[in-house]
Image (cartoon, helix red, strand yellow):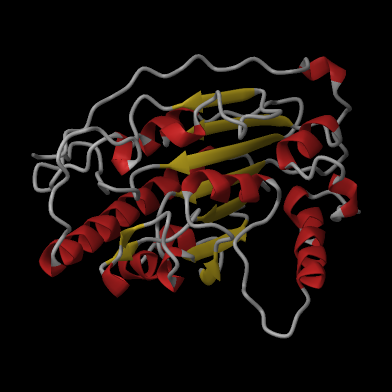
Amino acid sequence: MPFRQRSRPAPPTEPAAAPVAARPAPPGGARNVVVVVLDSLRYDSAMAAGMPNMGRLGDVEQRWSYATWTAPSHYNLLMGLLPHTSPPRVYASEYYKADFTRYSERFGVPGIDFASMLPSIWLPTYMRNVLGYRTAAMVSMPVLNPATAVNRDFDEYTLMESHNDMAGMVERLHFDPDRPTFWLLNVGETHYPYAVPGDDGTDLPRISGLHGVLKSAAEEPAFFDDAAMDALRTRQVRAASYADGLLAAIYDVVPPRTWIIVTSDHGELFGEGGYFGHGPIAHDKVLEVPFVEGTIR
């Protein structure tokens, strides 16, 4: 049975927990920050796609996610735990300290460290309630919908009507003229079925439920063979190339000095070790992700 792409009604955007006027004035020099998460994109797929626009931010690194599934990976990201470099002979506490110190450069605000983010250790809370940011998110995956715990201290949080509408995200991207804005964009094109707009996925067997997460009683298709795995990886590379083209559109929209992070929440398996996809899998390729950060102008 072929995969059929279906749109879904977007849940209402949940209101802010506190009015903008109640938060502090942002410090001088604070930057807008945009985090683009290309869902499920593994590092070598990104490299195969070339990703020239991703590369405009700097050298694209091979890094590793803290988790193998979308929801816990985004929880880590919003704690400030960006994909890591897996350095040997380094205490975890020292790595965290050094990585959190980089947030001073990312935000353009001196003096940020791990201790300053306590007690919540939650970027939207810290950015909104301490630094005076406006916080916003657009997500593609239903497991990140506005009713989940991920939507904490966001002023604006929207589940897109379709899982592959990065172009719609670009159209809706906006920035507060009076205070810096933090944006989280969870992009679904690079997630199974790796479908760009206009692609109905008729060449794929259908995994039941929403992207294979919510199962039905329907009989599942046979596990993908090697040829199908190769075709699926090719689809992800194509989807990554499409998403990279839209990064250029994001760069055109963001205000000057905006700090942009482009990465993935986790990797993907295309037959290695007998696995497909991500989630309940222990394998390097499900943790391996691309990472780059910097400014365009």
Residue 124 visible, this angle: yes
Q: Is residue 101 left or right of residue 55?
A: right
Can you give x and y, in whole percent of width and height, for residue 274 in the image?
27, 69
Q: Is residue 72 left or right of residue 201?
A: right
Q: Residue at 57% across / 25% down in the picture? A: 157
Give residue 124's quadrant in the image.
Answer: top right
Can you give x and y, in whole percent of width and height, for residue 193 in the image?
25, 46
Spot the residue most to the front: 217
Residue 59 visible, this angle: no
Up-down: is 248 above or below 22? below
Can you give x and y, in whole percent of width and height, for residue 86 in the image?
62, 75
Can you give x and y, in whole percent of width and height, for residue 271 in the image?
25, 68
Up-down: is 182 above or below 9? below
Q: Is residue 204 left or right of residue 138?
A: left
Q: Number of numbered discs present?
A: 0
Spot the residue most to the bottom: 89
Q: Residue at 67% across / 84% down in the picture? A: 88
Question: Front-most of 201 and 120?
Answer: 120
Q: Residue at 66% across / 37% down in the picture? A: 182
Give residue 101's quadrant in the image.
Answer: bottom right
Q: Residue at 40% across / 63% down in the picture? A: 42
Q: In which quarter of the image is the N terminus?
A: top left
Q: Is residue 104 left or right of residue 182?
A: right
Question: Front-most of 101 and 144?
Answer: 144
